[in-house]
Amino acid sequence: MGAGQLVRAETATGDVRVILGTSIGPIAIGMSRSAITRVTGPPAATKQYGFYRFRVRGLTVLVSFGHWGRARSLRADSGKLVVNGVPLSAGPSALTAALPQVQRSECGTYTTLFLPQGRRQSGFGFFTAPALPRATIVNTAMRR
């Protein structure tokens, strides 16, 4: 799975909680690679396209690290990601209802929800089926 490819097959074995601007499952912005490895086990693959691939409940979470070796961005594609009690599989309208401060952008068959939170930003992408929804969290203050 490259950084730009859409994921079409669900691999998560259960719900994975997303905390806005902070974490996907137990992996949080600012964690070191060794701290993530203690929680999830070693990466599923070595660095590819600038990301390390860690597994959380069967789900691949892509992690890029910043200049101090801390997690700078997190990305996962799954309908089993849950934000504020709403699974991403419920669609962009359900998530917009749960997060009224979210900014929504539509481009043809693709919908993006964006939630700026200071230096940490959360985004959600909804693609045409059968592609799975995507969650991204980035710390914009941390250099690559």
Image (tube, helix red, strand yellow):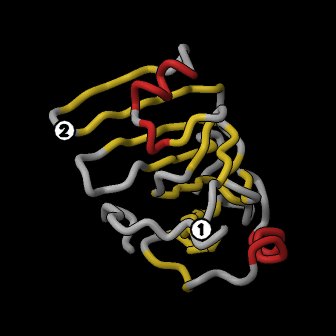
Residue density around tag 1, few if under 14, some if 14–19, many if 20 or more, within 10 Å: few
Foreground residue, 115 or 50? 115
Above or below, 40 against 16 in this view is: below
Separation of marks 2 and 1 at Cα, in angstroms: 27 Å
Q: The C terminus lies in which quarter of the figure?
A: bottom right
Q: Residue at x 30, y 34 (%)?
A: 111
Q: Residue at x 54, y 27 (%)?
A: 115
Q: Nearer the viewer, mark 2 or mark 1?
A: 1
The label on residue 5 is: none
Please state if 26 lies on the left or on the right of 52 as rendered: right
Above or below, 52 against 46 in this view is: above
Name the residue that disc number 1 marks. 13
Could you say which quadrant of the image residue 116 lies in? top right
Foreground residue, 15 or 4? 15
Q: Secondary structure at mark 1?
A: loop
Q: Residue at x 65, y 26 (%)?
A: 118
Name the residue that disc number 2 marks. 109
Please state if 1 lies on the left or on the right of 119 as rendered: left
The kind of residue on which mark 2 rests is: Thr
The kind of residue on which mark 1 rests is: Thr
Q: Secondary structure at mark 2?
A: loop
Which percent across, then down, holds residue 23? 70, 48
